[in-house]
Image (tube, grey):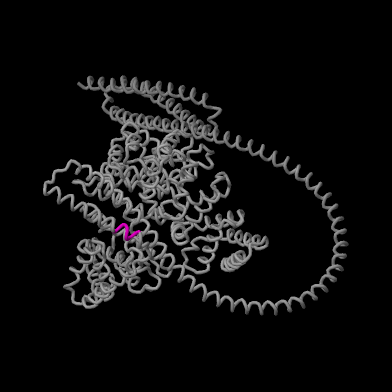
């Protein structure tokens, strides 16, 4: 069943239960509530439909009725808590449907039994509903709720009741001066303070955070707060809060811890203490490490804390040092190898990268994180670029950041709806503001001009201009609102044009595109919205663009004037209707208590007249001893009247809010009445259709009876088939036993295969070792072969020398013919020498043959290595002997030559 049908059934069950609180109606309504609870109801209240609004109004009314069944009330509260899934839904339940007052009344009715599950449920839902929401002191049952919370906090009950009471009290007291003044005016406030101070030693971090939050809201500017948050205790408080933020019990504890630290930073004295806190850098690095989580809620609170720190000048520079510490290249290297196993140092170095990653995070619900990250980077870069010399790490970080920013500018698709368009325009505004900030310094402007193209800016401006000119005013908020779609698109467009104006001299074709956009006829609408805005920066941006556009020939100045006039004409009407459209603080409601107003105005007139008389008396120097006492009395009365006036102002605000809610409910009732009539007609037609269907179903029923008879016969056949299947089952069991035996054999074979694989691996390793040994021996063989070649070369040189000596000997024969006897002796000696040479040649041949044998035997060097070495040594000895003999021959031949010369002489 779809959601619309369930809501219609729920509305019908609510009306029936109102008519009669019978057991059947209660069970039917409880069933419908549980069915709706099982469906996905995200953003149901913010859809603006009448049917969900009517159902929620009825449920809130039943929940606040004391006569409603407690089980039904619990189911209704569970459903309402499920509907409060986002900030907009919580705000609507709080302000439009008065769910806070309803739950407070339920708690008041069951205040005697605070441990009842229904009371605990109401406290938990109220804590969720009032978080970051202002609750007026004049809200129904708020005083009773505060008294209940204070009583149970001081009653020393179990943590089950104390923890939600503390959380709800922290929500009510935070940034709410009326509730704070009411609590301070109570008689039992001092015992309440003592109880809270005792809770600071509680073993639950959540209780400690809630307690610190309440004490900071109530006592920060009083003597108790000065003692509690003085210089002696504040450092321990900082350490405690940072530990809770980093190592807290969960997201809830971290949220309240961040809120506490943000509230403390609003105090200038405590902010100064934090700047001198010695462990601040280490704590800040641990807090930045929380950005690595994928939880958008935790990341949003961390970014909120960092933005609050940026508001303190002494902390802003420290924050810049931590975020911009790593270089961009190092960040990219870390970005290429992310993982859950990073240590603390790696997370510290990645703090800047984690901040950049949240800009374009695909995590659902991370839109606010993206805008907060952009705002934080804007503040940090503004601090760094405002220095006299911009550090290199900031320039590197900007270079790494710029592609991410340009990627955020893309993706504008008006077809996705107004919600997507509004989010994207907010993102474009923040991104272009950051780019404009980068353009303020020459070093970063050059980086921006290199990566920003004129085509990107032109396409972005044209898309925004079409959105500004073409969005439907019926789907937008009022034009005076900051969230008006036209206003949001116009602001994004003007920021884009301002960026184009900054870069028109540095980027190619940027000046042409800029002047082209200024001469578009549709530019008049966003310019008029900027010039008539109540934001100073928008007006200044519009004026600067107008100054650039006025000299252009096709600038639509007449259209701009008409648009400005129309916006100015709308201002008085907007002021008249502001009570029904904007916050009630701006215009007081017409429905007030005239007697209270008359008495307060008469009292104020009397006070003013008395003050004038006293002043006149002092000017006339009337000496009276009681004048100072009278002045003190009337000063106290004046302060009392001032506090009464503030309370009356709160009452007026609440009445104005109630008036606006009543007007809204009247409009809803008229629309619901028309819708109910249409629904009644539709239900009548549905009734007729159901009658026709009943007749058709009657015929189908008779057919089903015949089918039942046929099914009986089929059942008998199925029983026979079942018997056959039983036999097949027995056969299957036998086959299963055979299969198990085969499976055992297969497992045994698989085990043997694994053993063989292990043996194969061992043999493979042994083969590799043998192959390596063979390669080493091969290298040794090659080395020995090279040495043998060198020996052969020496033998060749000796042969050449012998040939030369032979030629010399043949020459000397002719000269020695005279001395034939001596020649014969010398011939005989020569023959002996020749025979010796022949012997040497034979021995050389034998050596050559041995070398060949050695080369043949090299393939089996593993076995003959030792023999080859001995043979080589022997051959070397023989070669040495041969060389000695050759040298002797050479010396003998040289001796012969000398003798021949002497004989000739």
- Residue shown at the point (58%, 58%) measured from the top left: 37
Looking at the rendering, which quadrant does residue 240 occupy? top left
Looking at the image, can residue 824 be seen? no
Q: Position of residue 494 (x, y in %)?
A: 27, 65
Q: Is residue 575 magenta?
A: no
- Residue furthest out toward the left: 620
Which of the 4 image quarters holds residue 184?
A: top left
Screen quadrant of the N terminus? bottom right
Query: Is 877 left or right of 690, judged from the image as shown?
Result: left
Q: Give the range drawn in magenta.
A: 596-601
| Residue in front for this viewpoint, 753 or 547 | 547
Q: In this view, does 486 lie above or below 387?
A: below
Residue 107 in the image: x percent, y percent?
52, 50
State whether the magenta stretch is mostly helix, strand or loop.
helix
Residue 808 location (% of width, % of height): 29, 29
Between residue 48 and residue 500, name the one nearer to us: 48
Q: In which quarter of the image is the C terminus?
A: top left
Determine the residue positioned at 54% across, 63% down: 58
């Amino acid at each position: 069943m779809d959601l619309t049908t369930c809501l219609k059934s729920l509305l019908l069950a609510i009306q029936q239960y109102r008519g009669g609180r019978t057991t059947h109606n209660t069970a039917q309504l409880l069933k419908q509530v549980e069915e709706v609870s099982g469906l996905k109801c995200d953003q149901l209240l913010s859809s603006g439909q009448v049917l969900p609004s009517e159902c929620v109004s009825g449920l809130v009314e039943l929940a606040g009725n004391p006569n409603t069944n407690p089980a039904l009330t619990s189911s209704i509260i569970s459903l309402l808590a499920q509907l409060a899934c986002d900030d907009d839904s919580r705000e609507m339940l709080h302000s439009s449907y008065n769910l806070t007052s309803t739950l407070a009344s339920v708690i008041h009715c069951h205040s005697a039994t605070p441990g009842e599950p229904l009371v605990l449920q109401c406290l938990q839902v109220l804590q969720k509903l009032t978080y970051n929401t202002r609750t007026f002191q004049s809200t129904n049952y708020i005083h009773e709720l505060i008294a209940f919370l204070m009583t149970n906090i001081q009653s020393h009950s179990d943590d089950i009741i104390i923890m939600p009471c503390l959380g709800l009290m922290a929500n009510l007291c935070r940034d709410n001066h009326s509730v704070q003044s009411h609590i301070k005016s109570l008689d039992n406030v001092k015992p309440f303070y003592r109880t809270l101070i005792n809770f600071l030693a509680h073993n639950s971090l959540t209780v400690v955070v809630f307690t610190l939050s309440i004490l900071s809201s109530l006592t920060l500017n009083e003597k108790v707060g000065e003692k509690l948050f003085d210089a002696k205790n504040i450092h321990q408080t900082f350490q405690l809060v940072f530990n809770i933020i980093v190592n807290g019990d969960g997201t809830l504890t971290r949220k309240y811890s961040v809120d506490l630290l943000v509230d403390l930073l609003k105090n200038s004295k405590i902010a100064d203490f934090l700047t001198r806190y010695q462990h601040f850098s280490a704590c800040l690095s641990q807090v930045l490490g929380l950005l690595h989580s994928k939880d958008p809620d935790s990341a949003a609170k961390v970014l909120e804390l960092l933005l609050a720190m940026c508001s303190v000048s002494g902390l802003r520079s420290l924050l810049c040092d931590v975020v911009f510490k790593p270089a961009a290249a190092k960040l990219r290297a870390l970005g290429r190898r992310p993982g859950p196993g990073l240590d603390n140092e790696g997370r510290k170095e990645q703090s800047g990268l984690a901040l950049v990653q949240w800009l374009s995070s695909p995590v659902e619900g991370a839109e606010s994180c993206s805008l907060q990250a952009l705002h934080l980077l804007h503040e940090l870069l503004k601090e760094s670029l405002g220095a006299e010399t911009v550090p290199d790490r900031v320039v590197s970080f900007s270079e790494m950041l710029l592609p991410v920013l340009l990627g955020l500018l893309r993706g504008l698709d008006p077809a996705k709806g107004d919600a997507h368009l509004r989010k994207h325009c907010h993102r474009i505004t923040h991104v272009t503001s950051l780019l404009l900030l980068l353009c303020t310094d020459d070093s970063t402007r050059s980086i921006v001009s290199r990566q920003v193209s004129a085509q990107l800016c032109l396409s972005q401006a044209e898309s925004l201009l079409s959105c500004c000119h073409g969005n439907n005013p019926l789907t937008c908020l009022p034009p005076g609102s900051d969230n008006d779609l036209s206003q949001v698109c116009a602001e994004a467009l003007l920021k884009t044009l301002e960026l184009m104006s900054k870069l028109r001299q540095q980027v190619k074709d940027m000046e042409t595109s800029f002047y082209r956009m200024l001469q578009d006829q549709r530019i008049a609408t966003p310019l008029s919205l900027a010039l008539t805005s109540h934001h100073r920066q928008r007006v200044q941006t519009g004026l600067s663009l107008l100054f650039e556009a006025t000299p252009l020939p096709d600038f639509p100045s007449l259209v701009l004037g008409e648009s400005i006039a129309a916006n100015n004409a709308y201002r008085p009407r907007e002021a008249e209707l502001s009570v029904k459209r904007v916050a009630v603080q701006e215009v007081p409601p017409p429905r007030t208590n005239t007697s209270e107003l008359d008495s307060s105005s008469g009292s104020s007139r009397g006070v003013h007249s008395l003050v004038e008389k006293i002043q006149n008396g002092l000017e006339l120097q009337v000496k009276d001893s009681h004048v100072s006492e009278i002045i003190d009395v009337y000063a106290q009365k004046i302060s009392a009247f001032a506090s009464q006036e503030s309370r009356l102002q709160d009452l007026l605000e609440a009445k104005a809010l109630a008036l606006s809610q009543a007007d809204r409910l009247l409009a809803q009732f008229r629309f619901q009445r028309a819708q109910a009539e249409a629904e009644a007609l539709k239900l009548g037609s549905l009734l007729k259709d159901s009658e026709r269907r009943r007749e058709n179903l009657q015929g189908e029923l008779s057919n089903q009876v015949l089918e039942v008879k046929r099914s009986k016969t089929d059942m008998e056949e199925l029983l026979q088939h079942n018997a056959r299947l039983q036999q097949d089952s027995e056969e299957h069991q036998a086959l299963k036993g055979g299969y198990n035996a085969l499976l055992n054999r297969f497992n045994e074979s698989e085990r043997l295969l694994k053993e063989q694989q292990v043996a194969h691996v061992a043999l493979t390793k042994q083969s590799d070792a043998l192959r390596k040994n063979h390669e080493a021996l091969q290298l040794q063989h090659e080395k020995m072969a090279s040495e043998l070649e060198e020996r052969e070369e020496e033998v060749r040189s000796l042969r050449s020398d012998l040939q030369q000596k032979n030629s010399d000997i043949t020459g000397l024969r002719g000269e020695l013919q005279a001395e034939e006897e001596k020649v014969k002796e010398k011939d005989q000696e020569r023959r002996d020498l020749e025979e010796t040479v022949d012997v040497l040649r034979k021995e050389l041949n034998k050596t050559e043959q041995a070398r060949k044998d050695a080369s043949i035997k090299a393939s089996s060097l593993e076995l003959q290595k030792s023999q080859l070495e001995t043979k080589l040594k022997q051959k070397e000895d023989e070669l040495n002997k041969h060389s000695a003999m050759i040298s002797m021959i050479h010396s003998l031949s040289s001796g012969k030559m000398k003798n021949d010369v002497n004989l000739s002489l």
